[in-house]
Image (cartoon, rainbow, N blue to C red):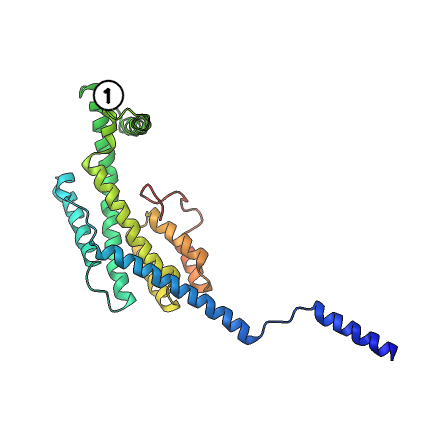
Amino acid sequence: MLGLGLALTLTSCRREQRAPAPSASVSAAGRDFTLQARERHFQDELTRSNTRFQAKPSLGDCAKALPEKADLSLCQAAESALALLAGPPPATPEAALTRLAASALSLARLADRLRYLSLEELTKQRLVAGDGGVAPKPSASGAVAGALSAVARAQREHGAGHAEHPAVALSEGPVSQLLGVTARLERDVLRNIGAYLEYGPTPVRHAALDTVKGLHAEHPKWPSLEHLLREAAVLEADPELKQALRDLSPSDSPHGPAQSAGTK
């Protein structure tokens, strides 16, 4: 009897040491919770973006900043694509992604052009502020570097209370202001695409992947989009989708901030 009691005691100890395997119902509950959390985040993001775009954000007066016809056309195209986002909600995720892709691409193209024009604007103002409008013609790289240095110096002096310094106006030209608005709206649209790509149900994520593939083909050098792809690859659990996202965003892509001053 003593031996039998000892054997039962040892068996009981072994059972206590081994954690029971989760039942099928517990595992299913965990998966359901993950799906519910994903769906909740997806709906929250859609609500946020819908509120944002129903407010009808605008680029403002394009003609004020862009007198050239070709540049003005870029701005007007972006404004038209943006206006579609304030219309009635699309019937399907695919329709929504089509609208978003058109808006994102037009805003990105406009932002690229505005960055170039903004450097020109800063360079000209730098010459006027520094030399009274009379200065030798510097090289393009030297002028740009000088302009950027002047802006940084002006910001420091402005913070120290020298608001009347002439260089303070360097960052406040119409092109620079339009660039700031454009960059913010580009981030908003890409974030909306990211909601479909990161949090939608699996079929929706596949549709969003097709959308970003198209955007990547149309505009390969797009840091904001590459940033979105890297984020989506980290979150993705489906092996096929994860690999496809990694293929679109190779490891040697630049890991700096998005095209605009802020991040997504």
Q: Quadrant of the N terminus?
A: bottom right
> Could you tell me residue 111's position as x and y percent?
25, 44
Identify the residue under disc 1.
Answer: 130
Q: Is residue 84 above or below residue 122?
A: below
> Could you tell me residue 137's position as x and y percent?
22, 23
Q: Which residue is drawn at the image coordinates 12% and 42% (left, top)? A: 63
Q: Amino acid at mark 1?
A: Gly
Q: Is residue 84 left or right of residue 242?
A: left
Q: Which residue is drawn at the image coordinates 17% and 47% (left, top)? A: 75
Instruction: Name the residue nearer the viewer: 81 or 212.
Output: 81
Q: Which residue is drawn at the image coordinates 30% and 25% (left, top)? A: 161
Q: Is residue 58 visible?
A: yes
Q: Is residue 225 above or below residue 144?
A: below
Instruction: Name the residue nearer the viewer: 262 or 127.
Output: 262
Q: Which residue is drawn at the image coordinates 39% and 67% (left, top)? A: 202
Residue farthest to the right?
A: 2
Residue 112 sits in which quadrant?
A: top left
Instruction: Name the residue nearer the viewer: 58 or 124.
Output: 58
Residue 214 sits in which quadrant?
A: bottom left
Q: Is residue 216 left or right of residue 253?
A: left
> Could you tell me residue 53's position as x and y percent?
24, 56
> Mark 1 packing: few (<14 Cα in 10 Å), some, or many (20+)?
some
Q: Secondary structure at mark 1?
A: helix
